[in-house]
Amino acid sequence: MESNPDISSSFSGLLLAEPLLMAVNKLGLEKPTPVQMQAIPLAMEHKDLLVSAETGSGKTAAFLLPTLHHLISLPSTKFGTRALILAPTRELARQTFTQCQHLIEFTSLKVGLVTGGDDFKHQQGIIRRNAEIIISTPGRLLELIEQESPDFSHLEVLILDEADRMLDMGFSEDVLTIAERCNAQRQTLLFSATLTHYGVIKIADKILKNHKVVALNTLYDRHNNIEQQIVLADDNEHKQKLLAWLLLNETYDKALVFTNTRIKADELRGPLRGQKLRVGVLHGEMDQKDRNRMMELFRDGEVNIMIATDLAARGLDVKGINLVINFDIPRNGIDYIHRIGRTGRVDELGLTVALIKATEWNLMAGIERFLKQKFKRRNIKELEGKYKGPKKLKASGKAAGSKKKMEPKKVAADKVKVRQRDKKNIGKRRVPSDRPASND
Ligand code: AMP
C-alpha cells in the first residue's frame, strides 16, 4: 500500500465517515483548518470541549463534522432530537443550517432550522417530524419548549456556537434552561470567540463535564471584556507593597486577590487590615461555617476585598467583582481563566493585574501563549522595582538562557550525595515495578 505523507493533515486522516468525506470533497475543502485539526479528534472521542475560535476559522465544520460522524456511526432507534445547535442570531443559525445541509447530502440525516421570525406552526412541524439535528436561537426554542415541549431527553450532542455573543445578548438564563431540558449524559461543545469572558467561564462551569480546552483565537481578542495587566515585582515584600497600593488606588466595588497557598492567603490579611482595608480570607482549610460567613460578608459588602485560593474560589459567584489581582501567578492557563472569569460582567469592563517575579516570568509567558493573548505591562511609578523582565526572550516569550547551569563543584557534591543514598538503600525492599512508586 502506498503511504500518503499528508494523510495526518487531511480530512481522511481524521477518520470521518465516508459520506462526510464525500461532502467535504464536493465542497472543495482540501485540508482541515487548525481548529478542525484540533477539535475534531477530541470531539470524536465524545469529550466535552471549550473551544475558542473566531468566525472564519472553519469552526462550524469543526463541530458539525464530528457530530455528524457520531450520528452516522451510532444510529439510534429512539425518538427525539439527537443534536441541538444553539446560535445567537437568526443569520448565524441559517448559515450553520446551510452548511449542515451540504455536509449531510450523502446521508439520510435530517436537519431543521428553528428561529424567530419564521412561521411558528411550520417550526412545530419540524420538531414533530423528528429531524435528528435542530439548529436554533435560544429565544425561539424556549417558546417552543413552553408550547410543544420538544423531546431532548435522548439528546446526544449539545453545541453552543458563539457562546460569548449569545451571553452578551442576554441569553444566559435561556441557555441554562435549555441545557437543563437536555439529556444529562450528552456531550457538550462550547464554541466562543474568547475564553476570557465572564459569562462563558460561568456557563462552562455549569454545563461542561471534564472538558478539554482548545484555544485558537487571535492575539487581539476584540470580544474581550477583561483588561489584563502585569506588574513586575522584585520579591514577595515588593509584591505586598504593590498589592496594597493597587487596593488603595484602583477604583472597584469588590476585589478578589488570589494566592497559590492558604498560608500566603492568611499572611496577607494582617498587613492589609493594617492599611484599614476591609479584607476577608477564603481557603479550603477553613470549616464550612466560616467559609459561608465569609461569603456572606463579601456578598453584603461588609468586606470588599477577598483573598482566596483557587479551590475556595471555584464556583464563587458574587456580583460587583471588578478587580482581580493574582498575587501569585496560577500554575496553569485553565486556573488563570477561572480566576479572571470572576470579573468583567457582561456590560462592564473588569481589570486583572498579575504580580510577576523573575521566577514566575516563564509561567506567565506560558499562560499568554495558551490564551493567544499578550498581557499589558504596567508600571507603578511610586513603587518601581529593580526587576525589568528577562534581558533576552525566546520566540515562545520565555526567558532565554534562564535555566541555571550548575557549577561543577555542586554537580560533584550532588553525585556524592546520590551515591551515599544508594549505598544506604542496598538490601531495602524495592517497590514492585508494576505498582506506582509513590502515591503520596
Ligand atoms: P466558519 O468559521 O465556520 O464561519 O467558516 C468560514 C468559512 O470557511 C466558511 O465559508 C466555510 O465553508 C469555510 N471553510 C470551513 N472549513 C474549511 C476548510 N477546511 N478549508 C477551506 N475553507 C473552509
Image (cartoon, rainbow, N blue to C red):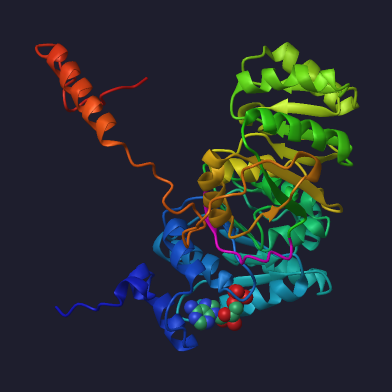
Q: Is residue 329 left or right of residue 416?
A: right
Residue at horizontal 66 percent and vertical 14 percent from the top: 286
Residue at horizontal 52 percent and vertical 39 percent from the top: 359
The answer, for residue 76, to whether it is visible in the render is no
Residue 273 lies in quadrant: top right
Image coordinates of residue 219 in percent, x first then y, are: 63, 65
Q: Is residue 206 above or below residue 68?
A: above
Q: Is residue 159 left or right of residue 114?
A: left
Image coordinates of residue 370 in percent, x first then y, are: 54, 54
Q: Nearer the viewer, residue 432 or 245?
A: 245
Ligand 1 lies in quarter: bottom right
Q: How many marks?
A: 0
Q: Is residue 58 above or below residue 331?
A: below
Residue 168 lies in quadrant: bottom right
Q: Which part of the image, by quadrant, shows the C terminus?
A: top left
The answer, for residue 322, to whether it is visible in the render is yes
Q: Main secondary structure of the magenta part?
A: loop
Residue 138 lies in quadrant: bottom right
Residue at horizontal 66 percent and vertical 59 percent from the top: 194
Q: Is residue 210 above or below residue 281?
A: below
Residue at horizontal 32 percent and vertical 71 percent from the top: 8
**218 part of magenta stretch:** yes
- The magenta region covers 211-223
Q: Which part of the image, by quadrant, shows the N terminus?
A: bottom left
